[in-house]
Image (spheres, rainbow, N blue to C red):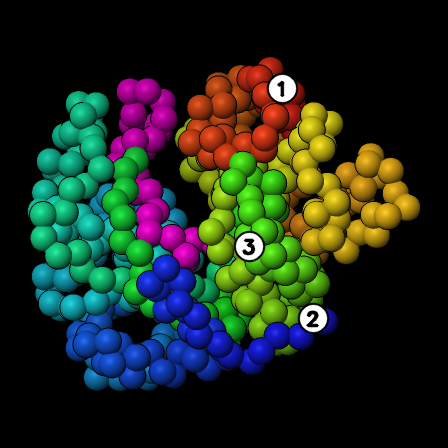
Amino acid sequence: MLPITNSFEYDYFGSEIVYGRGCIDSIGEKLSAAGFERAMIVCGSHVGANDALMGPLADGLGDTLVGVFDGTTPDKTIEDVYGSIKATEVYDPDVVVGVGGGSSLDVARQTGVFRAAGRSLSEVRADAEAGTLERPNPSGDVLPAIVVPTTFAGADLSDGGSIEVISAADSPTGQPIRTKGRNMPQKLFYDPALYETTPIGALAGSAMNGFNKGIETLYGLDADPVTDATSTHGLRLLRESYPRLPDGDSAAMDRAVAGIVLVQFQRKTSIIHAFGHGFSRRYTLQQGDVHAVLAPYVLEYLFSKIPLRRELLAEAFGVTHEPLSADAIADAVVDAVVDVRDSFDLPTKLREIEVIDRDDFAQIAEFIMTDSSMKQAPRDLEPTAEEIESVLHNAW
């Protein structure tokens, strides 16, 4: 396997990345050094009940830990955020520590934003129902956030995380109404030992979401040599380590966590993520499952339309491209993505995801076409709704 350093720290646009097995032991010390005295954990109920995770985290935080809010849900609702805000009124933290998957990390970040905006839950919901909802506008200091990710969703190195105010089922447009503010985490702790406390099913469900961030950064509209380097190396680490995770390989976990950090550097989510968002605008589902199904089909579509930097993708996936034709390189890259996907117990067809209705594909294709991630679609790609819908039917 590719060698990596056992631990490192890195400044990422003012956020401190701390990586290493056992690095969570230093979280309290680092928070104290930064001037924080009262930390409140934000997580879901399963994480909150996971002693193998919460024990080391609580020990690391030590006297700085003042309380736990374990009410986040995968849906990332506005109620989750305001539940966390209510908990801050009880514990009076000067920093929140988001722990777990992407939903908990997003709620932790948005807790500070909505709290500083000073508006009530009923006011925010009323604006959403009236069609006048805007991004929260903090009028005071935003409560800082620290994140401790334990899945591969790749929602860590981000200042956002959209929050659902009205669900698709209750929305007059048939689409969920969401909003978000900006709150970049001040510190991020990547401890492979904590990832190992997450059930393999939850890791699998997040794996392709993070993996696809690396793929898309390579062909995103604003790709550059720096992001080429970080994404290529990150994908190499993930490609070789993901298939070993179901066997409990700790060395593979170390490399997988390092890889998921790298593929997020200045990430440029593009058309695959637009496909995923198209489904989340219609259904409540696991984004990683949709990413697992669609990535090979979207790549096949892209390769059929444009060159798509296939030689660089070949490098990232260990494909020997010199003696191969352009079509053969494309096929080999898609096969490599399928191999990574199939190393987990993940769906391979859209029909395997119970909530999805094929009759919705025309509407979902329209959602995909208007998604903000399409602004980063590869250069020279001019997709149509009909082409997008065809990809969905191919993946059915």
Residue at 49% from the left image edge and 56% from the top image edge: 265
The segment highlighted magenta reads 153-177
Q: Main secondary structure of the magenta part?
A: loop
Residue at 44% from the left image edge and 74% from the top image edge: 9
The answer to whether residue 212 is seen in the rendering is no
Residue position for label 2: 2
237 vs 75: above or below: below
Question: Would you identify the image quadrant in which residue 188 lies?
Answer: bottom left
Mark 3 residue element = helix
- So how many labels did they put on this image? 3
Dot 3 amino acid type:
Val
Judge depth for marks 3 and 2 and give the one in front. 3
| Disc 3 + disc 2, Cβ < 8 Å | no
For label 2, count other residues whose C-alpha is less than 10 Å away and answer few (under 14), some (14-19) or many (20+).
few
Mark 2 residue element = loop
Q: Earlier in the sequence, mark 3 or mark 1?
A: 3
Residue at 50% from the left image edge and 69% from the top image edge: 195
Judge depth for marks 2 and 1 and give the one in front. 2
Dot 1 amino acid type:
Glu
| Disc 3 + disc 1, Cβ < 8 Å | no
Residue 296 part of the magenta-drawn span: no
| Quadrant of the snapshot with the N terminus | bottom right
Q: Earlier in the sequence, mark 2 or mark 1?
A: 2
- Residue 68 placement (x, y as % from top left): 24, 68
Residue position for label 1: 387
For label 1, count other residues whose C-alpha is less than 10 Å away and answer few (under 14), some (14-19) or many (20+).
few
Dot 2 amino acid type:
Leu
Residue at 70% from the left image edge and 63% from the top image edge: 240
Q: Nearer the viewer, residue 255 or 305?
A: 305
- Residue 183 placement (x, y as % from top left): 27, 53
Residue position for label 3: 226
